[in-house]
Amino acid sequence: MLFEARGLTKRFGGLTAVSDVSFGIDEGEIIGIFGPNGSGKTTTLSLIAGMLAPTAGDLVWQGQGIVGRRPFEIAEMGIVKTFQNPQLFPELTVLDHMRIASHLGFKRALGARRLFTLVWPWAAADIESGADAKMKDMLHLCRLTEARNEKAAALSYGAEKMLGVAMAMMCDPKLLLLDEPASGLGQEEIVNLEAVLRDLRAHGVTLCIIDHKVGFLGRLADRSIALAHGAMIAQGATRDVLASDAVVEAYLGRKHA
Ligand SMILES: Nc1ncnc2c1ncn2[C@@H]1O[C@H](COP(=O)(O)OP(=O)(O)OP(=O)(O)O)[C@@H](O)[C@H]1O
Ligand SMILES: [Mg+2]
């Protein structure tokens, strides 16, 4: 198993945002996380990515406990999270954003050679050209090649979100955590996003995706978990999770179930 959450719990004062949640993710899977507003979905991903510390429970990545690691360490280990709303710099172009995002991969690729670049700056050149090639690949994969010189302020919301994904990909994730990638997108943009996410999986990235859109995530996710009030109310094949009484009730109320 690539990743496992065991008894994951997060309390904010008197509020239990995530309550004793356990699930695993296998390499190459697409896992969906469903649940009504405030059910603990974003908190769960933030805990996995190290942006929040759990109140209780374990997070195991490739057999190793990662609770207490800093977000950048977790990103370096291969777990990267995108934000519900990408925070972009309006005056910077798509390429500028990609250059900023390539920083982490650049540092890692250099490793010990980083020291030499202090003395011989050209030692970094081959790695920089490698980063350029990766940037091109990721822009292509995320359907952003034509928009590469656009300022972020001029991008459609769909393209903004795609840029968030492309930037995350520059960090070489093994597990990519996506917080509502399809929210606010039109039908055409959603079809586009679906194709991009399938391509990422084909590139060997494991995906864990939060979304409310039953059609979108229903088609995409092999397995899903559903949360309500922080607790896991269903898990299994996405089709079964979406059809379960507990999930229908959580979204629509008891009388519909
Ligand atoms: N930093 C925080 N401090 C206090 N309470 C928080 C904090 N972050 C989240 N919460 C609360 O924890 C609960 C779960 O929030 P979370 O953002 O994880 O829900 P969500 O399922 O992602 O909701 P949405 O679908 O609206 O994005 C909510 O009641 C929220 O108000
Ligand atoms: Mg959320």
Image (spheres, rainbow, N blue to C red):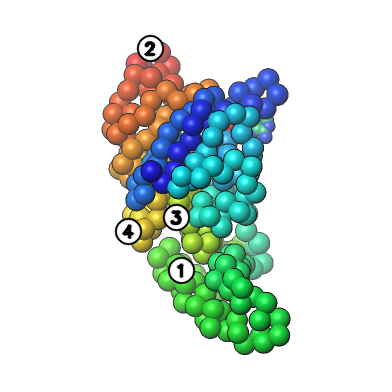
Classify 244 as above or below 148.
above
Query: Which label sits on residue 174?
Result: 3
- Locate residue 50, reporting x and y percent: 60, 44
Q: Quadrant of the C terminus?
A: top left
Proximity of marks 3 and 2: CB atoms separated by less than 8 Å = no
Disc 1, SS: helix
Give the residue pinned by disc 4. 202
Q: Nearer the viewer, residue 147 or 9?
A: 9
Residue appearing at x 49%, y 72% in the figure:
135
Question: Does residue 255 appear to the left or right of 14 in the view shown?
Answer: left
What amino acid type should be assigned to the residue bearing mark 1?
A: Leu
Q: Please tell me in which quadrant of the rendered image residue 102 appears.
A: bottom right
CA distance for labels 4 and 1: 16 Å
Q: Nearer the viewer, residue 78 or 32?
A: 78
CA distance for labels 1 and 3: 18 Å
- Locate residue 118, reporting x and y percent: 71, 81
Give the residue pinned by disc 2. 255
What amino acid type should be assigned to the residue bearing mark 4?
A: Ala
Q: Residues within 10 Å of mark 3 (few under 14, many from 20)?
A: many
